[in-house]
Amino acid sequence: MLHQTRGRITRDNGAAIDALKKRAAEWEVPLTQEAAGFCFHVWNSKATLYPDETGVTIEISSPEHRLLQTLQGSLTELFEECLLCPKWDEVAEGALAPGMSLMQVASVTRRSPGFTRVRLEGHDAERFGGGSYHFRLLIPRKGRPPCWPRIAASGRTVWPEGDDALHRPVYTTVAYGQNWIEFDIFEHKGSPTSAWVAEDPTGRTIGIIGPGGGGCPDSNNLFLFGDETALPAIIRMLQEAPGKVRAFIQARREDLCELAADERVSIVTDLVPALEALELCDGAHVWFAGYADQARAARTYLTSQGLQKRDFTAAAYWN
Ligand SMILES: Cc1cc2nc3c(=O)[nH]c(=O)nc-3n(C[C@H](O)[C@H](O)[C@H](O)COP(=O)(O)OP(=O)(O)OC[C@H]3O[C@@H](n4cnc5c(N)ncnc54)[C@H](O)[C@@H]3O)c2cc1C
């Protein structure tokens, strides 16, 4: 089923279409021109702008309501920057930010010396157990009552600021079932998320937003490289990869838990030299995630070896 909405900008001088073209170029997403309009394609959704003598009509269609609202908010923000105010047929004024869910912290369990596993429960948890592995955890500042992001009358999302600003780190759904998900927090110094979990938030309500980001690459020969922060994603890919998979992990053995006995897994002291030592073969896909400098070095190395963008993933998980 497609979700749809429509909006209108009056007294536009071509500024909306110019802004959309610029955004498509910045985000490297397609903007196609059809007979009567310009189509912007992103997040499996489509926004079409139809110019006429008195303004522009905007039509958005999307397979998911949250993606429709996300695109509606994002376009509103873009057009407002050009001093254009779209008027939408429908705005979910006051609703939680698109894709945001409130969940109960059901349990907090020490999994290994470095990791704590958190289980969240909520009626729409299932959404976070699909092909997009990641979400943002929304943590209110210590001692403040939560103030959640909401959709404003204009259609854009307003995030709390100042003392109410939320900490928004990205985590990975490592396991899921009906009405629950679990994620693993790698503890490190100076981490607000580590401080939050150390207080044992069991029973509290927490916000999460998503899902987003990648999932398991569709390759029959997959090589995974990652540090502790990538371990949950690697656990998922070792379970879900359709073909052969090998993983090289920069972490302490005691933090590998069940993976310590998995023959497909090797511990390495540094990810980049381990990647450089790999004999790359045709048809292989390399997935790499870790510290930003390592991800940059991996991208440079893989490109220098002639790999195309579609043949590898090199993601900065922290910096
Ligand atoms: C797509 C994606 C998925 C991720 N999945 C997970 C996951 O499932 N589990 C997980 O633990 N992490 C995961 N991460 C990494 C996590 O988002 C970062 O480690 C993030 O910095 C944690 O937020 P923070 O509360 O520590 O606060 P921040 O303000 O981001 O960081 C606080 C301080 O900690 C430092 N820091 C951050 N990470 C590390 C680290 N690993 N080691 C040492 N110092 C560090 C920062 O440099 C900063 O100085 C993921 C990241 C991405 C992009």
Image (tube, helix red, strand yellow):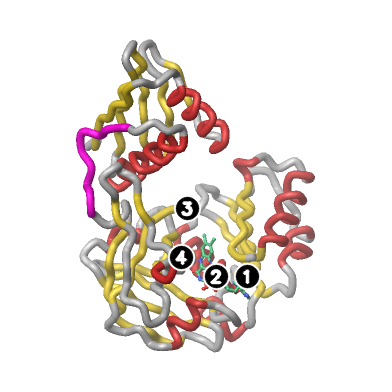
Residue 43 visible to an observer of this rendering? no
Q: Residue at x 44, y 81 (%)?
A: 196
Position of residue 109 in the picture relative to residue 307 (left or right):
left
Specify the amino acid type for callout 4. Arg
- Contact check, label 1 and label 2, Cβ < 8 Å: yes
Instruction: Tell whether circle 3 marks a residue whose Cβ is less than 8 angstroms from ligand 1.
Output: yes
**134 over 20 or under it: above or below:** below
Position of residue 32 in the picture relative to residue 244 (left or right):
left
Tell me the quarter of the picture where residue 260 sits.
Answer: bottom right
Specify the amino acid type for callout 2. Leu
Tell me the quarter of the picture where residue 189 sits.
Answer: bottom right
**62 over 59 or under it: above or below:** below
User: Which quadrant is the C terminus positioned in?
Assistant: bottom right
Q: Nearer the viewer, mark 4 or mark 2?
A: 4
x and y, in percent, of residue 299 in the image: 71, 51
Residue at numbered disc 4? 168
